[in-house]
Each structure stands twice: as structure tokens, then as C-alpha cells.
Image (tube, rainbow, N blue to C red):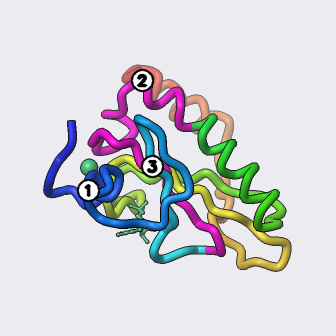
Amino acid sequence: MTDDNCIFCRIAGGTIPSATLYEDEQFRVILDLGPASRGHALILPKEHFEDVCQLDEGIAAKVLPLGAKIGAAMKKALGCAGFNLVQNNGKAAGQTVSHFHMHVIPRYEDGPSMVSWIPGEITSEELEEVAETIKKSL
Ligand code: AMP
Ligand code: ZN
């Protein structure tokens, strides 16, 4: 299903033009309009899923291989040294468009640092406690 009010549905469906670098029956891969680095791309399923929790399992199974294919092409074509696959779920996690998407962000040797965090500290008791808490909801 698609949602006429969703910008990524309209881009993925071709109603709104985009710089498309890959398309098949289920996906469109476009360049991000606010790129974190040269070549920053977004993998968009053509169907509307709000986030990874709603994503169809068949579509989900194809997202990582597609990310690998796009990333490998970026290394070849753009000369990036690596790439990040990044996927945000929920406002608190930085999701600004409520249509599942996977970022493919080329990383260059002299590029800015990004997609990083400051490692915290935790005791083995706390690790155990957090693991047990999450496990109960699986
Ligand atoms: P997120 O913050 O994970 O929801 O990512 C949304 C991304 O979509 C951001 O990197 C935006 O720059 C990008 N974006 C928003 N609107 C468009 C658009 N019309 N075309 C291409 N990229 C877009
Ligand atoms: Zn949508």
C-alpha cells in the first residue's frame, strides 16, 4: 500500500522526480537532497511502511543486500573508502520522514566524522539487568 500524503511514497512511485540511481519493482534508490557526503543515497521501498517494525519481512530481507550493492558501487564509482548503512526509527532516533528508508552514506578518508557516539560505561551487573529486561519483551 502507498500513502498519497507521504513524500517518499510519491518519490518512490515516480510522481515526484528524484535523482534515481537504482529502481526495481519494489525499491527506488535516490540521492538525498541534504547529503552528509557526496553520493549519500536513500533506499526507499515503494510500499509505505512507517519504520522497521512495520516493514514486510520479504522487503526487509532485500534491504541489506541492496545496501551492499549500492555501497560497493559507490566505492567503485566515487572512490569512497567505506560506507555507513544507517536507519532511523522514531523521532527520538532522528527519523524525520515516516516512510522506512535506509541511508547509504559514502565515507571518504578525509571526510567528516559522523555516525558515532561517545562510549559509556556499564558494570557487568547492569549489563545483565538490561539484557534480562529486554529479553522479557522479545
Ligand atoms: P531521516 O532523518 O532518517 O528520516 O532521513 C530523512 C532524509 O531524507 C534526510 O537525510 C533528508 O535530507 C532526506 N530528504 C527529505 N526530503 C527529501 C526529498 N524530497 N528528496 C530527497 N531526500 C530528502
Ligand atoms: Zn510512504
Expressed as whole percent of the image width and height from the top left, the position of residue 91 reads: 32, 59
Mark 3–mark 2 distance (CA, rounded to whole Å):
18 Å
In the rendered view, tell whether residue 13 sits above or below residue 80.
above
- Comes first in the chain, label 3 or label 2: 3
Mark 1–mark 3 distance (CA, rounded to whole Å):
11 Å
Check disc 3 and report its element: helix, strand or loop.
strand
- Comes first in the chain, label 1 or label 3: 1
- Give the foreground label among 1 and 2: 1
Q: Give the range drawn in magenta.
A: 37-63
Which of the 4 image quarters holds residue 58? top left
Which residue is under mark 3?
28
Expressed as whole percent of the image width and height from the top left, the position of residue 76 reads: 81, 57
State which quarter of the image contains the N terminus: top left
The residue lying toward the viewer, choosing from 30 and 127, is 30
Query: Is residue 51 covered in magenta?
Result: yes
Which residue is under mark 1?
10
Ligand 2 under 8 Å from disc 1 Cβ: yes
> Tag 3: residue type?
Arg
Q: How crowded is mark 3: few (under 14 residues within 10 Å), some or many (20 or more)?
A: many
The answer to whether 15 appears left or right of 121 in the picture is left
Which residue is under mark 2?
57
> Tag 1: residue type?
Arg
For the residues labelled 3 and 2, say whether their Cβ atoms are less than 8 Å apart: no
Point 52% across, 27% down: residue: 61
Check disc 1 and report its element: helix, strand or loop.
helix
- Comes first in the chain, label 1 or label 2: 1
Which of the 4 image quarters holds residue 127? top right
Check disc 2 and report its element: helix, strand or loop.
helix
